[in-house]
Image (cartoon, rainbow, N blue to C red):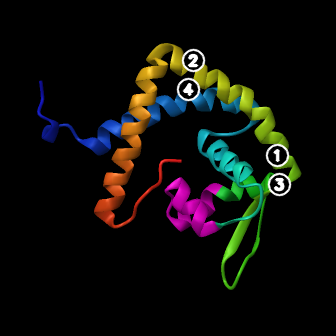
């Protein structure tokens, strides 16, 4: 068995992420979204109002320029609006069309989630999800930032 030091955390997690994203992307494609887009829209839906771009970037673990690139197709589809916030800050919010798209996408996300849980196991996923929060926190602590478990 290889030693933990010889198993690249970045590569292993990237392969796992790409594999699981394919499952969700296939389901969400039926409503014209990617997993990343759905995640952003769900985050905005939970906020129930405008969210500062810096807060969204932190929550989604995006660099600001990458977040802008991810938001642009959503803005073009009129699923979100980006507007001025306090000072020089910008905020982003769901539009009525964005709320409808999240609602339409949710059953497709649930299908992907159920398929994954049936294969991997709910208990195993619960344990791994908690460990992945710890992984993210460890990586952020190394770079000086902490992630909450929400």
Residue 63 lies within the magenta run: yes
Q: Is residue 137 above or below residue 125?
A: below
Q: Is residue 65 magenta?
A: yes
Q: Residue furthest bottom?
A: 87
> Which circle's residue, 4 or 1, is located before the other in the chain?
4
Select label 4 or label 1 by which is in front.
1
Please tell me whether mark 4 sits on a helix, a strand or a loop.
Answer: helix
Question: Of discs 2 and 4, which sits in the foreground?
Answer: 2
Q: Give how far across and how far down residue 90 sits, in percent.
A: 69, 74
Give the magenta part as a residue range. 53-70
Residue 99 badge: 1
Q: CA distance from mark 4 to mark 1?
A: 23 Å
Location of residue 42 by image quarter: top right
**Helix, strand or loop for disc 3:** loop
In the picture of the structure, the residue carrying the numbered disc 4 is: 23
Residue on which the image places disc 3: 78
If you read the primary sequence from the N terminus, does the residue marked by circle 3 or circle 4 appear first? Answer: 4
- Give above or below for 10 relative to 84: above
Q: Pointer 3: residues within 10 angstroms few (<14), some, or many (20+)?
A: some
- Residues at circles 3 and 4 in contact by the CB criterion of under 8 Å: no
């Amino acid at each position: 068995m290889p030693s933990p030091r010889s198993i690249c955390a970045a590569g292993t997690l990237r392969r796992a992420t790409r594999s699981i994203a394919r499952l969700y992307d296939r389901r969400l494609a039926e409503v014209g979204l990617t997993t990343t887009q759905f995640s952003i829209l769900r985050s905005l839906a939970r906020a129930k109002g405008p969210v500062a771009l810096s807060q969204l970037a932190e929550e989604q673990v995006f660099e600001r320029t990458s977040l802008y690139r991810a938001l642009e197709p959503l803005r073009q589809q009129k699923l979100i609006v980006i507007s001025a916030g306090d000072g020089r800050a910008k905020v982003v919010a769901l539009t009525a069309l964005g709320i409808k798209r999240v609602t339409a996408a949710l059953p497709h996300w649930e299908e992907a989630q159920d398929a994954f849980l049936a294969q991997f196991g709910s208990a195993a996923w619960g344990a791994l999800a908690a460990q992945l929060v710890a992984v993210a926190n460890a990586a952020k602590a190394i770079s000086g930032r902490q992630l909450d478990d929400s």
